[in-house]
Image (spheres, rainbow, N blue to C red):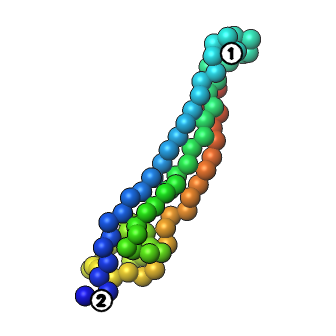
Amino acid sequence: MGFLYDTSWLRLREAALSYALPKSVTDKSPFGNVEIGVFGRNLFLRAPNYPHFDPEQNALGISNAQGLEFNSLPATRTYGFNLKLTL
């Protein structure tokens, strides 16, 4: 029982925030709609009783090695922005 872990966890997988410019601003441009935004993926992972591992990852893929952990690291955190222009 010394190597059993409670793998209860909480994750914020993705968040996005966007803003559409008002029509009064886009009327003077060739675009009908302009929207800008930011996003982030894998922003937060809290697994207090399962340190340094990601509970969703399995280094072996689909296999019969259930309950074995082979040092799978958490997914990479990414940030970005987007710009959507509509004619």
Q: Residue at x 64, y 41 (%)?
A: 81
Give the residue type at disc 2.
Gly
Q: CA distance from mark 2 to mark 1?
A: 63 Å
Farthest residue toward the right?
Answer: 28
Give the residue type at disc 1.
Thr
- List the residue tagged with mark 1: 26
Q: Residue at x 27, y 79 (%)?
A: 66
- Point out residue 80 in the picture as x, y percentages from the top left corner: 63, 46
Q: Nearer the viewer, residue 38 or 27?
A: 38
Q: Nearer the viewer, residue 53 or 70?
A: 53
Q: Is residue 57 visible?
A: no
Left or right, residue 52 beside residue 4: right
Specify the quadrant of the image occupied by residue 47. bottom left
Q: Nearer the viewer, residue 61 or 14?
A: 14
Give the mark nearest the N terminus, 2 or 1.
Answer: 2
Left or right, residue 65 beside residue 87: left
Q: Residue at x 60, y 40 (%)?
A: 38
